[in-house]
Amino acid sequence: MRIALAADHAGYVLKDELAAWLRESGHEVTDLGTNSPDSVDYPAFGSRLAETIASGSAHRGVVVCGSGIGISIAVNRNPACRCALVNEPLSAALAREHNDANVLALGARLTGPDLAKACIAAFLDTDFAGGRHQRRVDMLSPQLQDSD
């Protein structure tokens, strides 16, 4: 699977560890930065990842900032993205199953590497259930439906 990752300065260490783990697991990983502790603006990295998902260059995305909140808001400004902020695997699985989430947000200051990996594994291993959930997902980005 093609997976894009992005983070701000608070999340880059966790992002780097997750990128290495995903590559070791056989995924194609695109690292959109940042790659240092120098202060950056999370909206720019959330937007960069959202554009990557919207273009089809990646199937799924993972974003990381200190809490996961700010960067998830930035990603969700793109109507092609459904970004879910999670801190445990069940929420990650339900985000896929019920909401067809295509981006996962994590808080580096709140979620350690092992738990983050468990969340990502649940996210990647769960299929969208469709059915009654599809109608609701369609309501989230009606402008995308009009262009079909």
Image (cartoon, rainbow, N blue to C red):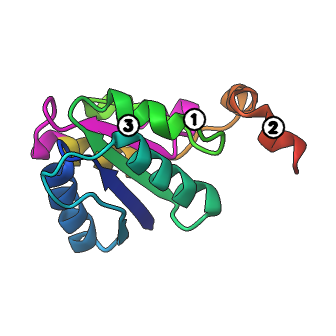
Which circle marks residue 143 in the picture? 2
Q: Nearer the viewer, residue 31 or 41?
A: 41
Specify whether residue 131 is in view.
Answer: yes
30 versus 74 height, above or below: below
Amino acid type shown at disc 3:
Ile
Indicate yes or no whether the magenta region holds residue 94: yes
As measured in the structure, the alpha-carbon distance from the residue carrying label 1 to the one carrying label 2 is: 13 Å
Residue occupied by mark 1:
77
Q: Magenta stretch?
A: 92-115
Which circle marks residue 119 in the picture? none
Q: Residues within 10 Å of mark 1 (few under 14, many from 20)?
A: some
Q: Nearer the viewer, residue 136 or 12?
A: 12
140 versus 43 height, above or below: above
Amino acid type shown at disc 2:
Gln
As measured in the structure, the alpha-carbon distance from the residue carrying label 2 to the one carrying label 3 is: 23 Å
Residue at (34, 27) in percent of width and height = 69
Q: Earlier in the sequence, mark 1 or mark 2?
A: 1
Residue occupied by mark 3:
71
Q: Quadrant of residue 90?
A: top left
Q: Earlier in the sequence, mark 3 or mark 1?
A: 3
